[in-house]
Structures are given as C-alpha cells and as structure tokens.
Amino acid sequence: MALFRGVETHTRSVLKAVSWRTLGTLDTFAISWFMTGKVQIAGSIAGLEIITKIAWYYLHERLWAAVLWGRR
C-alpha cells in the first residue's frame, strides 16, 4: 500500500508499540489499582487495554510514517 511507505519497517513499529505499551500498561495497572483497590480488576483493565492500544499505536505510527510534513 502506498499509504504506508515510510522510513520505518513494520517490525520496528511493532517493537516500539510493544515497548511503549508495556510502560503504559504498568501505569494503567497502578492507577486502576489505586482507584479500585482491587488487583484483579486492575489486572483486567490493564490486560484489555494493552491489546487495544498496541493496535491503535501501530496504526498511528504507520499513518505518521506516511506523512512527509515536518521531515528534513
């Protein structure tokens, strides 16, 4: 697809998404645990959001890779 021709490989985008989501999920887990006081609920919230947000981040990265604006 011409839309996704960027300077990064798909593998790099996936690895960036996974590393970022790991940090983000730890944050979500901590906040959820603090707000609910329940580790099980916090784990459920964190488990669901890691899946959805990796997909969104990957798509976001690939779309931005196709944007030429702001590059030198």
Image: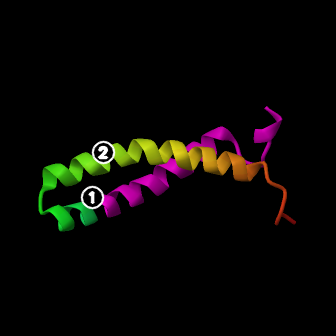
Residue furthest right as drawn: 72
Describe the colour scheme in one phrase. rainbow
Nearer to me, 34 or 18: 34
Looking at the rendered structure, the secondary structure element under dot 2 is helix
- Give me the residue at 40% from left, 54% from top: 22
Look at mark 2 in the image and give the residue it sits on.
Answer: 47
Q: Which secondary structure is most common in the magenta stretch?
A: helix
Q: CA distance from mark 2 to mark 1?
A: 9 Å
Q: Quadrant of the N terminus?
A: top right
The x and y percentages for residue 45 are 28, 50
Spot occupied by residue 25 in the image (x, y as percentages of width and height)? 36, 55
Q: Are marks 2 and 1 in contact (CB under 8 Å)?
A: no
What percent of the width, then of the height, locates residue 53?
A: 46, 48
| Residue at image location 40% in from the left, 60% down from the top | 23
Q: Is residue 11 magenta?
A: yes
In the picture, the quarter occupied by the C terminus is bottom right
Residue position marked by numbered label 1 in the rendering: 29
The amino acid type, in three-letter code, at marker 2 is Gly
Count of marks overlaid on the render: 2
Give x and y (percent) for residue 66. 78, 48
Does the segment drawn in magenta span residue 22? yes
Question: At 24% from the left edge and 46% from the top edge, which residue is drawn?
Answer: 44
What is the magenta range?
1-29
**Above or below for 34 versus 40:** below
